[in-house]
Amino acid sequence: MQSAETVLGVLRERGKRGLPLDELYRQMFNPQLYLLAYGRIYANQGAMTPGASAETVDGMSLGKIGRIIDAMRQERYRFSPVKRAWIPKKNGKRRPLGLPTWSDKLVGEVMRLLLEAYYEPRFSARSHGFRPGRGCHTALREVATTWTATAWFIEGDISNCFGTLDHKVMLSTLAEHIHDNRFLRLVRNMLTAGYLEDWVWNATLSGAPQGGVASPILSNIYLHR
């Protein structure tokens, strides 16, 4: 198996050159990517918080990675519904937060690594949200140094951005460059896994999981298109 760095480097180069991806799903069999993903998320706040099951980062092993990869090879891996919690906002309202199971977090991080490597070189230089090395400070720096003659700014907000992404548009946007139905089915399974609220299953007819590891990159792909 190729190293994770080699795989991601190839994807970045294909993204820069605008070349399609024909066999992305087979990268879900690469244990090196799962080890890299584990290193990225094991210390995150919430790694010990259970989702729809009692599974957490505690008890992580190479055997668990092997079982996930075996399920991927046979296309038997299924995302569990996320457990929904509500957290307060500054304006007094509440927003939903999804708590995926640990295995789903790990698989989601592998998918995020692959998608980010390919799509990041394609994104606009004007985009700063949910991107490596970018954020509010880089956006403000650009405003301060570039928009020096501007007198007025208009602030807008996409209400419930993650929750309102159209699944059909999302998948058709991915299919423009990812010519791999197995990977697209995996994304669709993640988007439609549903959520548990008070232990009652609810369908997710639109949107990406709030709190899902891959939701920010999927939103950026959607908004870029």
Image: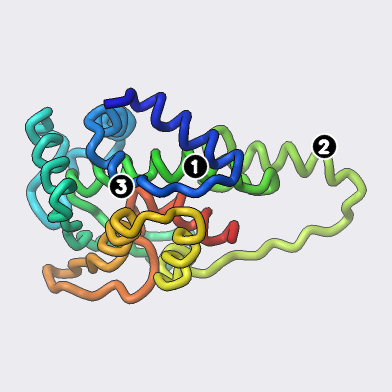
Q: Which disc number belongs to residue 157?
A: none
Q: Amino acid at mark 3?
A: Tyr
Judge the density around disc 3: few (<14), some (14-19), many (≥20) Cα neighbours within 10 Å: many
Give residue 166's quadrant in the image: bottom left
Where residue 181 sits: x, y (%)?
33, 59
Where residue 135 sits: x, y (%)?
58, 41
Q: Which disc number belongs to residue 118?
A: 1
Question: What residue is rendered at 52% in x and 69% in y?
Answer: 159
Where residue 41 sits: x, y (%)?
30, 34
Q: Which residue is mark 3?
A: 25
Which label's residue is closer to the chain start, 3 or 1?
A: 3
Which label's residue is closer to the chain start, 3 or 2?
A: 3
Q: Secondary structure at mark 3?
A: helix
Question: What residue is rendered at 13% in x and 57% in y?
Answer: 52
Q: Do callouts 3 and 1 mark residues in contact (Cβ within 8 Å)?
A: no
Q: Amino acid at mark 1?
A: Tyr
Figure check: 136 above or below 225:
above
Question: What residue is rendered at 42% in x and 55% in y?
Answer: 179
Q: Which residue is mark 2?
A: 145
Figure check: 173 above or below 200:
above
